[in-house]
Image (cartoon, rainbow, N blue to C red):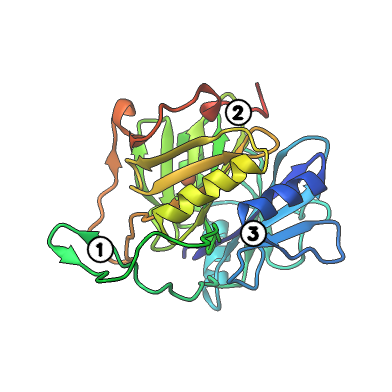
């Protein structure tokens, strides 16, 4: 039985207030309570998508997945069959659910919860050749701000992409959507093309968390705002090959990234989607500025 949602990711960071400001500038809403974690959520949702714990340096604290209702027992059974033992939660972690460790040692929390989806936006009104959906109305957006609707996915570095792929498919029931050799692999547990991805590196690490926004305009406006807020330039705007989404990656205070995405491939549960193994030279982006050197750097090991 598979997990059904990526609920949140949690990082350890040396200065929580710096991370809090970063994610607020990015467009998330502060939902910090009285425990030791800074909590941030997309504005339309009631649950947090990012937790920040105090720690000596930035690293992944844990990932949380959801399996609602009876499916929770199903995931426990699939973990048992895969020979994965339950572990203690990391110190200070949220209560509830069960905890395991993936082959890279990351703490993984599975909670008896479903996806929390934002309300639908009104349809975009774009004029394209032969298709006019905005008539006698000016289209240039006024007062637009980037407002992430929900967490889509996280990308982690790993020293062994295939080992992680085996764990998350066999033990947690995720499905491979696409990959490029043993360099990068994209897995899903919802209708999103990916909810978790792995990029080969010398060691484990956190690369980015990615949030859905409502348009290309919103990506570009968000990118601009993050530069004005003093963030180092990131990467984008561009269009990915695998997953097909428009992207902009803003650099976080620790050398990893937060991504705005729009127009990601959508894969219903029962459909004829065949994972493809893309050649490395045509896997990452179709257009956009050249990928900067720092984009692939795992600052946790280099
Ligand atoms: Fe991404």
Q: Are marks 3 and 1 in contact (CB under 8 Å)?
A: no
Q: CA distance from mark 2 to mark 3?
A: 25 Å
Q: Position of residue 31 (x, y in %)?
A: 74, 65
Instruction: Find residue 273 and report its image quarter.
Output: bottom left
Front-most of residues 110 and 289? 289
Tell me the residue that label 1 is attached to.
271
Q: CA distance from mark 1 to mark 2?
A: 35 Å
Q: Is residue 259 left or right of residue 10?
A: left
Tell me the residue that label 2 is attached to.
298
User: Can I make out residue 252 in this image?
Assistant: yes
Q: Residue at x 35, y 63 (%)?
A: 139
Q: Position of residue 226 (x, y in %)?
A: 61, 44
Front-most of residues 245 and 144? 144
Name the mark nearer the viewer: 2 or 3. 3
Tell me the residue that label 3 is attached to.
28
Label 1, residues with CA under 10 Å away: few <14, some 14-19, many ≥20: few
Disc number for residue 85? none
Q: Is residue 162 left or right of residue 29?
A: left
Q: Is residue 50 left or right of residue 194?
A: right
N-term-proximal mark, 3 vs 1: 3
Instruction: Find residue 270 and report its image quarter.
Output: bottom left
Q: Are marks 1 and 2 in contact (CB under 8 Å)?
A: no
Label 3, residues with CA under 10 Å away: few <14, some 14-19, many ≥20: many
Q: Residue at x 32, y 60 (%)?
A: 267
């Amino acid at each position: 039985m598979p997990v059904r949602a990526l609920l949140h990711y949690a990082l350890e960071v040396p200065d929580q207030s710096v991370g809090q400001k970063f994610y607020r500038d990015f467009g998330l809403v502060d939902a910090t309570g009285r425990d030791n974690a800074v909590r941030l959520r997309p504005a339309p949702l009631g649950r947090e998508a990012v937790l920040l714990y105090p720690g000596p340096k930035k690293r992944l604290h844990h990932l949380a997945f959801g399996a609602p209702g009876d499916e929770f027992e199903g995931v426990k059974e699939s973990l048992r069959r895969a020979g994965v033992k339950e572990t203690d939660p990391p110190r200070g972690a949220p209560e509830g659910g069960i905890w395991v460790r993936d082959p890279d040692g990351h703490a993984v929390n599975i909670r008896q919860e479903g996806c929390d989806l934002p309300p639908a936006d009104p349809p975009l009104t774009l004029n394209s050749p032969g298709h006019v959906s905005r008539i006698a109305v000016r289209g240039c957006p006024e007062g637009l701000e980037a407002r992430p609707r929900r967490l889509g996915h996280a990308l982690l570095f790993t020293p062994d992409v295939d080992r992680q792929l085996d764990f998350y498919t066999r033990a947690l029931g995720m499905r491979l959507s696409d990959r490029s050799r043993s360099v990068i692999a994209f897995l899903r547990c919802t209708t999103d093309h990916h909810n978790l991805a792995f990029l080969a590196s010398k060691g484990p690490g956190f690369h980015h968390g990615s949030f859905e926004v409502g348009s290309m305009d919103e990506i570009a406006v968000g990118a601009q705002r993050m530069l004005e807020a003093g963030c180092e330039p990131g990467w984008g705007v561009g269009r990915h090959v695998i997953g097909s989404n428009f992207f902009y990656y803003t650099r976080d205070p620790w050398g990893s990234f937060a991504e705005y995405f729009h127009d990601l491939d959508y894969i219903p549960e029962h459909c004829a989607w065949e994972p493809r193994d893309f050649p490395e030279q045509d896997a990452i982006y179709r257009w956009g500025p050249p990928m900067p050197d720092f984009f692939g750097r795992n600052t946790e090991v280099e």
